[in-house]
Image: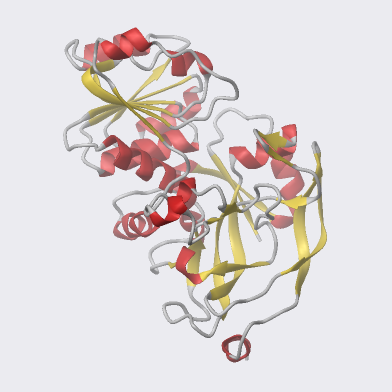
Amino acid sequence: MLQQAARGGRMHGQAEGRALVLEEKGRLSLRDFAIDETLGENDVRVAIHTVGICGSDVHYYTHGAIGPFVVREPMILGHEASGVVTETGKAVTALAVGDRVCMEPGIPNPTGRATRQGMYNLDPGVRFWATPPVHGVLRSSVVHPADFTFRLPDTVSFAAAAMVEPLAVGVHAVTKARAHPGHVAVVIGAGPIGLVTALAALAAGCAHVIVSDVDDTKLSIASGLGAISTVNVTKASLDGAVMAATGGWGADVVYECSGNDRAAAGVFEPLCPGGVVVYIGMPLAPIAYDVAAAQIKEARVEHVFRYAHVFPRCVAMLASGAIDLAPLITRTFAFEDSVAAFELACQSPPGQVKMQIIL
């Protein structure tokens, strides 16, 4: 019935149900919230199953803004999601009601210059879930373009599928690095983005990844993911560990995932001559950049903002077993406990990598 109705034309109406709403800085509520959504001919409606808690969601909760994006009215949080298709638009042929899916949360302007040049993640007009004024997906259902909705193989769980969004950042970073088999890589920061980047580097053939952080529990998780060694930078020198592991040559790639100003300022020290640095973590303020240190190694520098063209590859790697994200999911919450989950997440508890909410 729903599918037939959707294929009959554009479906208008309000979607109403409980949602996790950021009322204002520092105040969350779980309440009924109505959103006027239209199911277009190229859209699908998805019943949300699992949503990951991202650092950006927490930052909006604690600060009320990220750069120019300011929460000025109540906004639903959440952008890392998986679910089940419940309706399809009349022009949708690649998806059907009942399909398990994950969704890429940014919708670019298809006629924008950046989009037409293949850089749709850089489109100034992109509408990204849980980025003001766009509502997120910690709610019962969402309407989304079918082209940004991806069917899940049976071997990929809802939990893993809700991790595709952060994994996409790591895969995009490794792609930008032009990583080669046999590389030695450094990943600074063992949070969710750091660990998915380490996994993506290994999947691309990296021979050895050295992960640094200040949290021993997260580093213990990292050490169990494959050919990874770890450095707690409060106890040992990252540069010394890298040089010892590479015979004094340095790492081929340094992925800066922490956003920490001190860590980001030292990215060229463990790098080998002619190596590449990829900035992934987003500092809250401008950082020091040692031009001379970069010059004497002729370092190549890349930057990552979200991702583009990688969601299908991420799903394929999960389906094949090339990447296993289960060790990164450290805690789950029922939807009814969403507010408590965010209150815990904003404390950055030791050992917690990715917390998820199940609707």
Q: Is residue 149 visible?
A: no
Q: At 43% from the left edge and 14% from the top edge, which residue is drawn? A: 289
- Count of marks placed on residues: 0
Asked where in the image residue 174 lies, by quadrant, the reply is top left
In this rendering, position of residue 31 left or right of residue 10: right
Which residue is at the front of the view, 131 or 256?
131
Look at the image and name its color scheme. secondary structure
**Residue at the image point whose x is 69% and y is 55% from the top:** 135
- Give percent across and percent down for residue 278: 36, 29
Image height of 217 relative to 136, above or below: above
Q: Residue at x 38, y 64 (%)?
A: 155
Q: Give the position of the C terminus as an image quadrant.
A: bottom right
Front residue of this view, candidates 165 and 111 = 111
Residue drawn at (45%, 29%), measured in percent from left and top? 257
Residue placed most toward the observer, 219 or 205 = 205
**Residue 93 appears left or right of 248:** right
Instruction: Pinpoint residue 43: horizontal percent, then vertical percent.
Output: 55, 74
Residue 36 is at least partly visible in this image: yes
Judge from the rendering whether residue 216 lies leftward or rightward of residue 356; answer left or right. left
Quadrant in which the N terminus is drawn: bottom right
Up/down of 339 relative to 33, above or below = above
Percent across and percent down for residue 216 are: 48, 22
* Residue 243 position within the rendered picture, expressed as x and y whole percent measured from the top left: 24, 12
Q: Quadrant of residue 139?
A: bottom right
Against 316, residue 286 (above or below) is above
User: In the displayed structure, would residue 266 be above or below residue 320?
Assistant: above
